[in-house]
Image (cartoon, grey):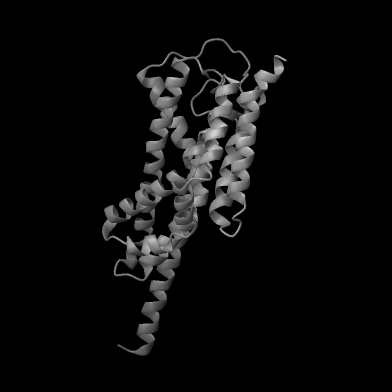
């Protein structure tokens, strides 16, 4: 084989790899846009997220809109899809660097001609982990509504004290060892991805699911803040998603996590103790 033929073959491989990268990036962008659009339009609810954001009341004191929908299997499925699509819209942007890193690792291995497939499998596993969280959030929403702590129509906590408790718990979790261990993984996943470079599509899916589990351990308490601000409140959705991305993508900003924790604890204490001062 001549040197020219070898160069031509390597050039074709490089073009193919660049094409795979573009395919994965484009697909990730489409997933984000589709999930964001579906979230904004209301995810099958009677009101869009824009309308619910406009009608949002103070924390713990939502606008009274009458009784909500009765829980049934179809309604529970709708709520689950609402949570999952919202998690996809919120978490996929900060997962994109890990997907690209995983593809880069695959490129230097024996399966380099299937990098796009492995990238999709990795992302699917990651999103399945957040699907598990969405299932838990759906059950929690049902439970809170069942005991009268959640306003179904406005999709927010209906008790200021309970909202304060969630803020307090989320703030305390910012200082936990589990939070910081999972955050370190999400900030620097290279070693994990290299050590768990399993062969085949299912191996990529499994690695993505494990990476998603770490990110879930890092961010689950922050996602519960949606119960406080309103599950369909766009300000809270965008704000939490942006903060999660900052935590992951700015590892040198070590002050960010404790400062946020203190802010959440302070806000939680305020909402818990405010009724005591109002009676004085």
- Relative placement, left or right, of 176 versus 4 is right
Q: Residue at x 35, y 84 (%)?
A: 5
Residue at the far bottom: name it.
2
Which residue is more in the foreground, 13 or 252?
252
Residue at the far front: name it.
280
Which residue is more in the foreground, 261 or 229?
261
Judge whether residue 232 can be spotted in this image: no
Q: Quadrant of the N terminus?
A: bottom left
Q: Position of residue 92 (x, y in %)?
A: 48, 47
Judge whether residue 18 can be spotted in this image: yes
Q: Residue at x 32, y 70 (%)?
A: 109
Q: Position of residue 234 (x, y in %)?
A: 61, 33
Residue at the far top: name it.
66
* Image vertical order of residue 273 relative to residue 215, above or below: above
Q: Position of residue 261 (x, y in %)?
A: 59, 42
Q: Quadrant of the C terminus?
A: top right
């Amino acid at each position: 084989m001549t040197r020219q033929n070898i160069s031509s073959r390597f050039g074709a491989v490089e073009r193919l790899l660049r094409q795979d990268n573009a395919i994965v990036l484009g697909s990730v962008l489409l997933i984000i846009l589709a999930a964001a659009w579906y979230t904004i339009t209301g995810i099958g609810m009677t009101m869009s997220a824009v309308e619910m954001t406009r009608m949002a009341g103070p924390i713990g004191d939502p606008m009274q809109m009458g009784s909500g929908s009765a829980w049934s299997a179809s309604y529970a499925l709708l709520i689950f899809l609402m949570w999952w699509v919202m998690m996809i819209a919120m978490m996929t942007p900060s997962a994109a660097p890990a997907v690209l890193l995983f593809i880069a690792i695959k490129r230097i291995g024996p399966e380099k001609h299937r990098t796009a497939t492995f990238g999709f499998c990795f992302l699917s596993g990651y999103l399945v982990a957040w699907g598990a969280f969405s299932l838990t959030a759906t059950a929690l929403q049902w439970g809170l509504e069942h005991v009268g702590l959640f306003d179904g129509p406005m999709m927010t906590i209906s008790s200021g004290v309970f909202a304060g408790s969630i803020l307090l718990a989320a703030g305390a979790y910012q200082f936990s060892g589990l939070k910081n261990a999972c955050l370190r993984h999400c900030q620097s996943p290279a070693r994990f991805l290299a050590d768990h470079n399993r062969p085949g599509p299912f191996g990529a899916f499994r690695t993505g699911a494990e990476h998603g589990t770490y990110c879930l351990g890092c961010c689950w308490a922050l996602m519960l803040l949606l119960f406080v601000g309103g599950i369909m409140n766009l300000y809270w959705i965008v704000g939490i998603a942006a903060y999660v991305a900052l935590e992951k993508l700015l590892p040198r900003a070590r002050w960010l996590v404790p400062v946020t924790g203190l802010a959440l604890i302070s806000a939680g204490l305020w909402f818990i103790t405010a009724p005591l001062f109002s009676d004085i």
